[in-house]
Amino acid sequence: MSGITRGLFRLMHRIVFKEIGSRIRTDALKNLTDLIYSLFEKISFQIPILVSIYMSLYDDAIEKEIKIADIKKDDEVLVIGCGALPATPVLIAKRVNANVTCIDHDITVIKKAEDFIRSMDLSDKVTVKHAEASEYPLDGFSVILIVYGVKKPETVMRHVAEHSDKNTRILLRATINNKNEISVNIPENLEVKNKIRLDSLGSVDSLLLTKR
């Protein structure tokens, strides 16, 4: 039964994100994709097979981001926008054994994320905090990852650009249209050093930014 469930979900994911997403950029489908992921997080939270499927969607994306940002064990990582099923911080912690802090403005999401982290036995590596991204102190973080769909992305980016450390590597998940325009305005004191496509997340790009 689990094999059938996994197969059906992967088929749905391919239709929505690979077939449709290859023709219509994710930003045009944002309301639909946000709804799908939100519902899936709520439904799958206590169903192990669905949790496994959800986490597997991020495997390739996280592997690429770890490589592009050269994330290592001694990095202090901040993930802005963790969600109820915090796949990004969990997979980073598991892959490179780095300390990861993830924040979200939704207290209900935070409580579910904390429960999930405990269930994964990662409370010593992943810290979940209820906070506004535009106000959170950024001192000491060598890597900051801003997820796609975070609220008020321009405000968050200005805060990161102003208050992050000089050598912090910043990963921004965003979309880029056919005119090579990024869906989020990049502050002038930041420059794009590299980028990579995260097809498994719906034609989202991950941009590596550093301070000029």
Image (cartoon, rainbow, N blue to C red):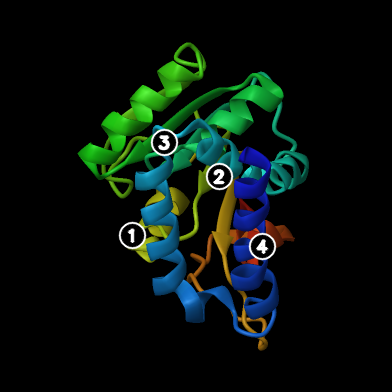
* Rendered position, 106 above or below 125: below
Along the line of sight, which residue is nearer the eye, 140 or 107? 107
Circle nearer the N terminus (3, 4): 4
Residue shown at the point (72%, 57%) measured from the top left: 193
Circle nearer the N terminus (2, 1): 2
The image shows residue 189 at horizontal and vertical percentages of 53, 60
> Do the residues under discs 1 and 4 have CB atoms within 8 angstroms?
no
The three-letter code of the residue at mark 4 reads Leu
The three-letter code of the residue at mark 3 reads Leu
The image shows residue 115 at horizontal and vertical percentages of 35, 23
Q: Secondary structure at mark 4?
A: helix
> Do the residues under discs 2 and 4 have CB atoms within 8 angstroms?
no
Q: Nearer the viewer, mark 3 or mark 2?
A: 2
Residue that mark 3 sits on: 138
Residue that mark 1 sits on: 151
Estimate how packed mark 2 is, as few (under 14), some (14 to 19) or many (20 or more) residues with alpha carbons within 10 Å. Answer: many
The image shows residue 172 at horizontal and vertical percentages of 56, 55
Residue that mark 2 sits on: 54
Q: Nearer the viewer, mark 1 or mark 3?
A: 1
Residue that mark 4 sits on: 11
Task: Report the residue that reaches farthest toward the front.
Answer: 1
Q: Nearer the viewer, mark 2 or mark 1?
A: 2
